[in-house]
Image: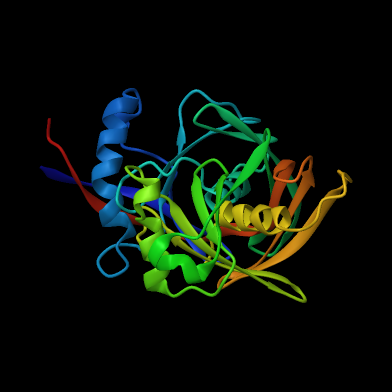
Amino acid sequence: MSEITIPFWKVEATGNDFIYLPKLPDSLTQDEHKALKWLRMVAPILCDRHTGIGGDGVLWTRPGGSTESPIMGFLNPDGSDAGMCGNGGRCFAALHPEADQIDVHGVQYPVHHVGSNGPSSDIALTFPGDVMVQKHAPFDALEHLGPVYQVYTGTEHAVVCHPASVEELHALRHHRFFQPKGTNASECLHHESGLSVRTFERGVEALTQSCGTGVVACALAWWSNQPFDGDSNIDSVRVLTDGGTLTVGAKRTGSTTFTSCTLQGAAGKRFEGSIALPFPTK
C-alpha cells in the first residue's frame, strides 16, 4: 500500500457537511468498480473528524452523465451506500450550476437553482414519483413515542412525533422491525413557526446537524397525520434543524400519499485543499 495526494472540496448544506472529490486518481477513472472499492476504503478516513477532514459523507461525480444531468456518487462515512442524500444532492447540484437534474442510482431528481447569496446557492431539489407514509402502532419499549411513521424518500426513514432522546432514536434506528437493513430515525415536533427535526443517520451512526431526506420524511409524516379533505393543492412548511432552516413542499394526493415533494435551502462550497490517502500498489 502506497500513498496518493488528491484534491478535495468541503461542501455544506444546513450543517450537513460532505467531502467532494473533484478528481479521482487517474488509474481509477476508467474502472468504476475499482474506484468504488477504493472510495469505500477511504471514506472512513476522509470523514473522521479527528484525523481526517470530517464530514457526513463523500461525494463525487460518476462517469456517464452530462452537464445537464450529472451522476452523483455518494457514500456514508462508514463506506456504505446511503441510497439518496437530500442535502448531499443539493450540494452536488450547487457544484453543477448548469444541471437541471441530478442522477442518483438511475433516478432523476430535478433541481432548481433559485439564487445565490455569497458562497451559498439556494437549491430546490424535487423527489420524483409518489411517496407513501405508512403508520405503525407504537413499538414495545418505545411505545411512549407514539406511532411510528415509515417513509421512503430515496432512503429508509422512521419518524416519531414525540420528543425522543438520542438513545431512543438509536434504538429506533436498529429496531428489529427494520432489520436487516435498518433505517434512519427522526424526531419531528410541531411548533407555531413550523416543524423541528432531528435525525439519527444510518451510516453516520449519530445525530447530524441536518438530514435532507429526513426533513422531507418528517414533513410528510406530519401532514399525513392532519385531516385530508380531498384538496390536492401544494403545501409548504418551514423545517428547523440544528444546522438551519429548510422548506419542504408537497402535493397531497390522498390521506397518506404525496407527490411533487421538494426540499429547498442553502448549499455550497466552503473550502478546498488536498489530502494524502492510502492507495493500493496493484
- Which one is nearer the viewer's eye here, 106 or 157? 157
- Which one is nearer the viewer's eye here, 217 or 228? 228
Residue 69's spot in the image, x, y percent?
62, 30
Q: Quadrant of the C terminus?
A: top left
Residue 84 in the image: above or below residue 157:
above
Q: Quadrant of the N terminus?
A: top left
- Which one is nearer the viewer's eye here, 181 or 62? 181
Residue 12's spot in the image, x, y percent?
53, 60
Whether residue 249 is visible here, answered yes or no, is yes
Which residue is at a point 51% across and 62% down the rendered structure image?
A: 186
Give the left or right position of residue 171, taking residue 277 as reference: right
Give the left or right position of residue 273, taking residue 155 as reference: left
Residue 242's spot in the image, x, y percent?
55, 73
Which residue is at a point 52% across and 50% down the rendered structure image?
A: 88
Looking at the rendered structure, the number of numbered marks drawn on it comes to: 0
Which residue is at a point 49% across and 71% down the rendered structure image?
A: 144
Whether residue 99 is visible here, answered yes or no, is no
Picture quarter containing residue 93?
A: top right
Which residue is at a point 53% across and 55% down the rendered structure image?
A: 137
Residue 96's spot in the image, x, y percent?
61, 42
